[in-house]
Image (tube, rainbow, N blue to C red):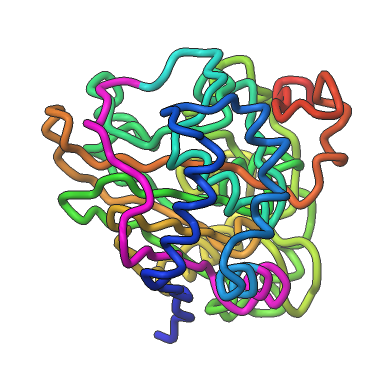
């Protein structure tokens, strides 16, 4: 089965040194920076990144020919403290060196934002094992297969991009990607999947404040010949479907599984995923809860904050109120 590879960009030593100089100047000897200051400065700082990196991310954004892009660093640009045992509390208003770099990179494709219903509304989400969530199909779980989904598929304002920064992945737990460009969708199925008749569910990570009503959406949207899609195989809501609609959805999910590929992130890697063209998943693994476990950081990125203005308190706020949809 043909799969389109994720594009890799390995930054050389001189490029990493230039990135470190940007961060050194930004932090000025401190370990943390105000997150609002970072958001205000990130676009300007992104123009100082190596040209090769800027070109690669722009091509990824505009050409839509790769499911994702991994930025690799030949020399370290941020440290990795011990993996926490729990998710951060609400109201985190500072960023670490790795988080600042993540936001600056993200500025090359759009604007970082978050939801009031996930990870206590913090801009930076943490992907790490939490003992109490061990048996749940969510990013902080570990013992269950977290099946294919596009991020925030239930919400019409889902970000165009999802980006993961890897601080640590000692057991080389893969990130599974499934690219719609590798899927052959029969015309009859495509006709059905473009209809707004499907109930797309929210993942458990979104708390009870998010809107979990059954709003009917299409699975495919956009261009008929090169469609975007939304799906959450963890919550297919098949009970709302009958006949050919249910069959088309199940067949599409199986085709996505058939073209799935594994990408292993290592410390220092930053992965950008096209959230409108790629579903992702994670296999089960066995954490040790001793500070050495897998630890990624996640940002949601949108090409336009204006489309969510009705759900944000101010023009500069990055917090979208999911429960108001």
| Residue 80 is a magenta residue | yes
Question: Can you say which quadrant of the picture contains the N terminus?
Answer: bottom left
| Residue drawn at (25%, 37%) of the image | 142
| Residue drawn at (62%, 64%) of the image | 277
**Count of labels in the image:** 0
Looking at the image, which is closer to me, 109 or 13? 13
Residue 238 seen in this snapshot: no
Q: Is residue 176 above or below residue 31?
A: below
| Residue 74 is a magenta residue | yes
Span colored in magenta: 58-86
Q: Taking 317 as reference, is 204 left or right?
A: left
Q: Position of residue 32 (x, y in %)?
A: 47, 27
| Residue drawn at (57%, 19%) of the image | 93
Question: Can you say which quadrant of the picture contains the C terminus?
Answer: top right
Q: Is residue 98 above or below residue 174?
A: above
Q: Position of residue 14 (x, y in %)?
A: 42, 70
Q: Is residue 158 above or below residue 130?
A: below
Q: Position of residue 198 (x, y in %)?
A: 69, 47
* Residue 229 lies in quadrant: bottom right
| Residue drawn at (76%, 69%) of the image | 191
């Amino acid at each position: 089965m043909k799969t389109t590879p994720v594009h890799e960009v390995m930054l050389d030593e001189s490029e990493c040194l230039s990135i470190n100089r940007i961060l050194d100047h930004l932090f000025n000897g401190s370990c943390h920076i105000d997150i609002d200051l970072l958001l205000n400065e990130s676009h300007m700082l992104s123009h100082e990144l190596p040209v090769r990196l800027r070109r690669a991310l722009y091509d990824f954004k505009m050409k839509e020919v790769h499911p994702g892009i991994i930025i690799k660093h030949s020399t370290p640009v941020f440290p990795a403290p011990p993996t926490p045992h729990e998710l951060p509390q609400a109201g985190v208003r500072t960023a670490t060196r790795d988080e600042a770099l993540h936001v600056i990179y993200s500025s090359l494709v759009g604007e970082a934002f978050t939801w009031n219903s996930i990870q206590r509304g913090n801009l930076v989400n943490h992907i790490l094992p939490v003992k109490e969530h061990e048996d749940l199909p969510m990013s902080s779980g570990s013992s269950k297969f977290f099946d294919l989904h596009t991020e925030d598929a239930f919400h019409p304002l889902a970000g165009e991009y999802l980006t993961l920064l890897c601080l640590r992945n000692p057991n080389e737990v893969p990130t599974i990607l499934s690219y719609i460009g590798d899927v052959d969708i029969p015309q009859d199925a495509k006709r059905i999947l473009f209809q707004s008749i499907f109930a797309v569910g929210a993942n458990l990570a979104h708390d009870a404040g998010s809107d979990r009503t059954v709003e009917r959406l299409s699975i495919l949207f956009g261009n008929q010949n090169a469609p975007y899609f939304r799906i959450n195989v963890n919550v297919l809501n098949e009970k709302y479907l009958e006949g050919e609609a249910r069959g088309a959805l199940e067949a599409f999910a199986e085709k996505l599984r058939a073209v799935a590929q594994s990408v292993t992130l290592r410390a220092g890697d930053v992965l950008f995923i096209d959230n409108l063209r790629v579903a992702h998943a994670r296999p089960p693994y066995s954490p040790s809860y001793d500070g050495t476990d897998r630890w990624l950081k996640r940002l949601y990125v949108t090409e336009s904050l204006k489309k969510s203005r009705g759900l944000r308190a101010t023009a500069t706020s990055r917090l979208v109120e999911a429960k108001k949809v």
